[in-house]
Amino acid sequence: MKHDDFNACLLVVVVLVVSAALSPAVATGAQWQLLKSSIGVSAMHMQLLPNDRVVVFDRTDFGPSNLSLPDGRCRDDPRDWTLHHDCTAHAAEYDVAANAVRALTLQTDPWCSSGTLDPDGRLVQTGGANDGERAVRYFNPCSDCDWKEEPAGLAAPRWYATNQVLPDGTAIVVGGRSQPSFEFVPKNRVTSAVVLPLLRDTNDPGESNNLYPFVYLNVDGNLFIFANNRSILFDYNTNTVVREYPPTPDGDPRSYPCTGSSVLLPLPPSGDDVQVLICGGAPRGAFVKASHKLFIGALKTCLRMGINDPSPVWSIETMPSARVMGDMVLLPDGDEVLILNGAAAGTAGWDLGRDPVLAPVGYRPGASAGVRFEVKTPATVPRMYHSSAVLLRDGRVLVGGSNPHAFYNFTGVDYPTDLSLEAYSPEYLAPEKAELRPRVVAAPKDLVYGEHFTVRFDVAAADDKQVRVTMVAPSFATHSFSMNQRLLILETEGTAPAVEEDEWVYEVAVVAPRSAFIAPPGYYMLFIVNGGIPSEGIWVRIQQQ
């Protein structure tokens, strides 16, 4: 064999080996479970409350839902676009433990709205369409509570906006259609809307591509805001841009309707390595083309950047499959981001998505580049436009929604309206992992910033060198973005057998997050993670002393 031929063959072998090594792994241990074939409403929006109930709602102007209001109640609204007299519910409370649904009464339209939990665990829900565009709605976590609404609670109409809880527990509401501004709820800072030039400058005529911006509280107290293909670090106290980040390398938008998804990756104990991950979306112009029935392929890339790096730059990674309108959920082990739902072509919008992506993908941020993705057990239900997913305290992921139509439409369409709820159980819930699964025996319910505390847990097979404690904030999920989603890996000071207890009981010494910049005040799910296997979470509340 000639020398050149040998080198060519060797090169082919190397390329094939590297390609094989970089192929995504396939995991089959996860499971899907149908919880309810119908809850009567489509899960366009979901929020887990600290009483283990999930508020689920869509919009009031779909026409009648499949869930009746109780006791013969009806809603009379002369401004409703579809029904002036409506005796059906457009919101429901799902009881996780009982697998039961309770109808709730909405008066104003929350279509494509936003939300957050306040420090008391109350859902503060803002904006929408029509008579709900300036509404602020409140829902308390109690067994018989219902919505309370302020129809004119916002300074400006907010449709497709994003909420982020701040260190003082206030919610900042950012953006919305034709609203390049922000405001606060409650109005304890500024009573009017404040212009945000980034949103004005990132609006694509005919497409927008800057709705539902990705907003995160940085550990320095400023806000990271991403819209279209640009991002800034923003001081909302002084209304100044602290830092401008590089635009996305491909120049394509990742915001609605070319909808990608995003998470703030798990924050380490030091809190100084803050990284944003954005996955999927659609090429610029895809929305207009889809509106003319030309459905081009979604983006197959993820972008990742350390927002506090001295010279931040987006790194690019390739997913196993293209995805638009996906959802991203931080799993409580702190090791994996779950990417699920969505389509492989088209964009967000009425009937503008095609080719559902049924197989979730896991992304392990701590793994080496090139081997971070893992394909999971596929679902059987397409979850297209208006789907959502939230983490539950038991470690499962609640998945629902999919209504790409202007009304409820169950027949004669490619992707019928879906009213079901499913649970996705990651591999850590597999029966063969039971010996490693810890159970929290004792822990404080209330925490103070920087407090040293102890969590007692039992487990059949302890791995004291790989015990970590995580805290996860419950998120408000809609339109492929989970607002306020945040996972903290807490500082620990050692694990040891508990004194005067049996051989299965251990204690881990933990330090609470040191400031509200790292963990805004309110409720979190706290997990013990043993050898990569999380316990069932417990609810804790953190606040100033």
Image (cartoon, grey):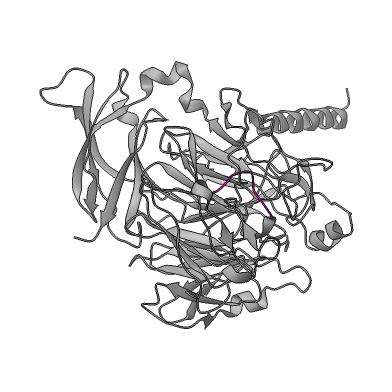
Magenta stretch: includes residue 442? no
Q: Main secondary structure of the magenta part?
A: loop
Quadrant (top left/top right/bottom left/bottom right) for the N terminus: top right
Q: Residue at x 36, y 37 (%)?
A: 537
Q: Position of residue 51 (x, y in %)?
A: 36, 44
Residue at image point 66% right, 60% down? 61
Q: Is residue 68 magenta?
A: yes
Specify whether 418 is left or right of 95: right
Q: Is residue 308 visible?
A: no
Report which quarter residue 213 is drawn in. bottom right
Q: Is any part of residue 204 visible from this angle?
A: yes
Residues 148 and 359: in front is 148
Q: Is residue 504 left or right of residue 134?
A: left
x and y percent of residue 32 in the render?
59, 28
Please, which residue is most extreme toward the front here?
Answer: 72
Left/right of residue 186 with respect to residue 325 in the rendered view: left
Kindly indicate the quadrant of the structure image that contains residue 381. top right
The range drawn in magenta is 63-69
Where residue 62 appears, as percent x and y from the top left, is: 68, 56
Q: Nearer the viewer, residue 278 or 206?
A: 206
- Placement of 195 over or under 284, stated as above or below: below
Number of labels in the image equals 0
Instruction: Name the spot of residue 363 as percent of width and height, x first.
Output: 57, 40
- Foreground residue among 158 and 143: 143
Q: Relative to 161, does residue 144 appear above or below in the rendering?
A: above
* Residue ID at (66%, 65%): 229
